[in-house]
């Protein structure tokens, strides 16, 4: 078996395993099933021009589609149980080309290896009602030391008050490539202009199951929702292949542009696949195996859900 078919084989096994653990919900994504789509505009500041030739990050305002989501494969899990949230952004060039940028509300992942991710899923018995059970969590903690930092972070994470008040991290490193071919390792973060706001457990208990979509739709009736795209510049020695590790907090960052959310898109029009490896000229994938693995896993999930499975 060549390397590519081995990766696809593992991606298929992984998606099958997610279905086995969480159930199958026809037509829904195999992860991040519950979500809302919005139209938005992204305007670059020009600050990234010395690092990349990517037009949307330098001089071209582009339309974008944004999808906010809960993490679970079961679309009925209440927002309050999905403490990590997703923000997927697709930049749409006038030429028809697209570039994706997918973030979540924690900066690190549970492993740097797709095979270990499968092993982690194998250790869990069920996630049908949301989180893994406590006993499974204890076993994960003992068996997978590289995952501890992410699990601890998830345990301490508070639910966001609004999709508009979360900070979203792409986790993986990418390379920006400029006119001279110079490659700079970077990570991306979406900083909410409304500030970071979270809810206490007591406040959460009073809210409806889908409070996040309702809140964001009401917020958009009275004005725009904005996020600033921060690019964190990596330095020599910062790992580019390990999404379990954060880069030092003091790394220089630039503000590449502003995203302005406009209006909700009818979910019936959801033909989108936010493959994180689909990038514009001037942005390249790093050597992070998880990033590259996601391409196949997302395609498998997409094919199944588009067939109504
Ligand atoms: C082994 C690693 C991973 C696997 C197997 C995996 C699997 C999946 C699958 C199957 C989907 C549904 C795709 C679709 O039907 O379009 C999905 C969606 C998503 N994943 Fe992952 N994922 C992984 C890592 C990550 C990481 C590191 C992030 C952090 C940024 C992430 C964030 C998301 C988000 C935000 C979505 C929703 C995309 C959308 O809005 O359409 N995933 N994931």
Image (cartoon, helix red, strand yellow):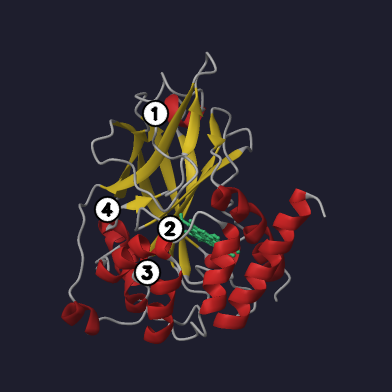
Dot 1 corresponds to which residue? 236
Q: CA distance from mark 2 to mark 3?
A: 25 Å
Q: Is residue 138 above or below residue 247?
A: below
CB atoms at circles 3 and 4 under 8 Å apart?
A: no
| Residue contact at pointers 4 and 1, CB within 8 angstroms | no
Residue that mark 2 sits on? 109
Mark sitting on residue 213: 3
Cα distance between the residues tagged 1 and 3? 41 Å
Mark 1 within 8 Å of ligand 1, using the beta carbon: no
Question: Which of labels 3 and 4 is toward the front?
Answer: 3
- Which badge, 2 or 3, comes first in the chain's sequence? 2
- Identify the residue shown where x is 54% and y is 64%: 117
Residue placed under numbered mark 4 in the picture: 223
Other residues around mark 4 within 10 Å, as few (<14) / some (14–19) / many (≥20): few
Determine the CA span between mark 4 and mark 1.
42 Å
Q: Residue at x 45, y 86 (%)?
A: 129
Q: Position of residue 287 (x, y in %)?
A: 56, 40
Q: Secondary structure at mark 2?
A: loop
Q: Nearer the viewer, residue 222 or 27?
A: 27
Q: Quadrant of the N terminus?
A: bottom right
Query: Residue 123: horizontal and vertical position, in percent?
Result: 52, 78
Classify residue 38 as left or right of residue 166: right
Q: Which mark is residue 158?
A: none
Quadrant of the image for the C terminus? bottom right
Disc 2 within 8 angstroms of ligand 1 (CB): yes
Element on which disc 4 rests? loop
């Amino acid at each position: 078996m060549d390397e590519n078919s081995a990766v696809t084989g593992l991606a298929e096994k992984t998606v099958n395993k997610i279905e086995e653990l969480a159930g199958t919900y026809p037509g829904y994504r195999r992860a991040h099933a519950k979500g809302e789509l919005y139209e938005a505009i992204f305007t670059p500041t020009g600050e990234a021009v010395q690092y990349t030739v990517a037009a949307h990050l330098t001089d071209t305002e582009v339309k974008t589609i944004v999808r906010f989501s809960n993490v679970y494969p079961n679309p009925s899990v209440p927002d309050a149980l999905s403490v990590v949230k997703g923000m997927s952004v697709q930049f749409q060039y006038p030429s028809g080309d697209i570039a994706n940028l997918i973030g979540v509300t924690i900066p690190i992942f549970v492993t740097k290896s797709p095979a270990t991710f499968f092993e982690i899923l194998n250790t869990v018995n069920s996630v049908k009602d949301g989180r893994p059970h406590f006993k499974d969590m204890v076993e994960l903690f003992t068996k997978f030391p590289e995952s501890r930092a992410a699990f601890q972070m998830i345990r301490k994470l508070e639910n966001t008050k609004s999709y508009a008040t979360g900070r979203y991290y792409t986790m993986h490193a990418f390379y920006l490539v400029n006119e001279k071919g110079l490659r700079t390792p970077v990570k991306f973060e979406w900083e909410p202009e409304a500030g970071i706001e979270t809810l206490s457990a007591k406040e959460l208990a009073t809210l409806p199951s889908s409070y996040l979509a309702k809140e964001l739709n009401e917020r958009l009736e009275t004005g725009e929702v904005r996020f600033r795209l921060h690019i964190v510049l990596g330095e020599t020695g910062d790992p580019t292949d390990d999404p379990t590790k954060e880069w030092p907090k003091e790394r220089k960052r630039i503000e590449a542009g502003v995203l302005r959310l406009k209006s909700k898109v009818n979910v019936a029009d959801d033909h989108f696949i936010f493959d994180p490896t689909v990038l514009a000229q001037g942005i390249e994938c790093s050597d992070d195996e998880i990033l590259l693995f996601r391409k196949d896993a997302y395609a498998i999930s997409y094919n199944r859900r588009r067939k109504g499975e």
